[in-house]
Amino acid sequence: MLPRLVVLSGAGISAESGIPTFRDFNGLWNNYRIEDVASPEGWRKNPQLVLDFYNMRRKDAQKAQPNRAHYVLAELQEDFDVTVVTQNVDDLHERAGSKNVIHLHGSLFKMRSSKDESLVFDIKEDIKLGDKCPLGSQLRPHIVWFGEAVPLIETAAEIVASADAFIVVGTSLQVYPAAGLIEETRDAIPKFVVDTKIPYISPRLGFNALEGKASEGMERVKDELRRIFAKQ
Ligand code: NAD
């Protein structure tokens, strides 16, 4: 059986694909207020603005291409049983070839009923005001907004707890409960964090930090993991 590699990724892994992160300089939040476009209150106040925002982001994601960091994760499937737990709502992990991807915060390529969150549909084009689910409620982006529960967090926590190796890449670890997943890792496994600005992680957790771009950092982690697991 292949060793289990679990990856927690964030907006930084897609930065080299031209998709802006939330918190970096020039981040999306400089042009929009979080509460307007990523909260249930914002949706109630101005659904048109929210739909415009995600319709635009979907187009940007469609134009973007996976970068080397996404491809490295797909290549690691040759040697590891890989699960990517991503906070990203783009589909670049899948397009690079990753087979097991958990989208903690939803997907730009799905929409759902406003009445029943289990009614989820695939989408390639814009969601418009007046587009209704079978229950008659307005369709909304299938995105977990601030203040909403993260339905997949328990599943993700179990997967992280079973990891034989763990990578954190391109996340500021500011958004909970996703950021708390690093606490679920077992003690004596190899752990890496790759980021242009390494986020704070308690030294108790034993992470190896590789500061730099995701594409370069992930190549180094790949070599390191292959070396460690070849020995065992
Ligand atoms: P974040 O913006 O808070 O943090 C991004 C992290 O990436 C930072 O630590 C930054 O230093 C790092 N980074 C920037 N460029 C990098 C690069 N080239 N290589 C490596 N690291 C780089 O994003 P987050 O932690 O993912 O959390 C915020 C929320 O943003 C999440 O809920 C997520 O849903 C959402 N988001 C998703 C996308 C996407 O789907 N691509 C884009 C923006 C935001």
Image (tube, grey):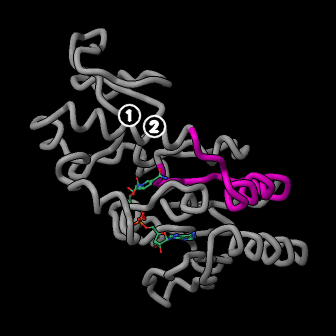
Disc 2 element: helix
The picture places residue 104, in percent across and down from the top left corner, at 44, 48
- Which residue: 35% across, 70% down? 174
Q: Nearer the viewer, residue 60 or 106?
A: 60
Q: Is residue 66 magenta?
A: yes
- Which residue: 57% across, 72% down? 186
- Which residue: 58% across, 40% down? 63
Ligand 1 lies under 8 Å from the Cβ of mark 2: no
User: Dot 2 corresponds to which residue?
Assistant: 58
- Other-residue count near label 1 (Cα within 10 Å), few / some / many at <14 / 14–19 / ≥20: some
- Other-residue count near label 2 (Cα within 10 Å), few / some / many at <14 / 14–19 / ≥20: many
Q: Amino acid at mark 2?
A: Arg
Q: Nearer the viewer, residue 34 or 122?
A: 34
Tell me if 184 is positioned left or right of 132 in this view: right
Residue 55 circle label: 1
Q: Quadrant of residue 209?
A: bottom right
Alpha-carbon span between mark 2 and mark 1: 5 Å
Q: Is residue 55 magenta?
A: no
Quadrant of the image for the C terminus? bottom right
Q: Amino acid at mark 1?
A: Asn
Is there CB contact under 8 Å for labels 2 and 1?
yes
The picture places residue 213, in percent across and down from the top left corner, at 62, 74
The picture places residue 189, in percent across and down from the top left corner, at 66, 76
Q: Nearer the viewer, residue 20 or 81?
A: 20
Total count of labels: 2
| 119, above or below 229, in the image | above
Tell me if 116 is positioned left or right of 126 in this view: left
Tell me if 146 is positioned left or right of 26 in this view: left
The residue stretch that appears in magenta: 63-88
Disc 1 element: helix
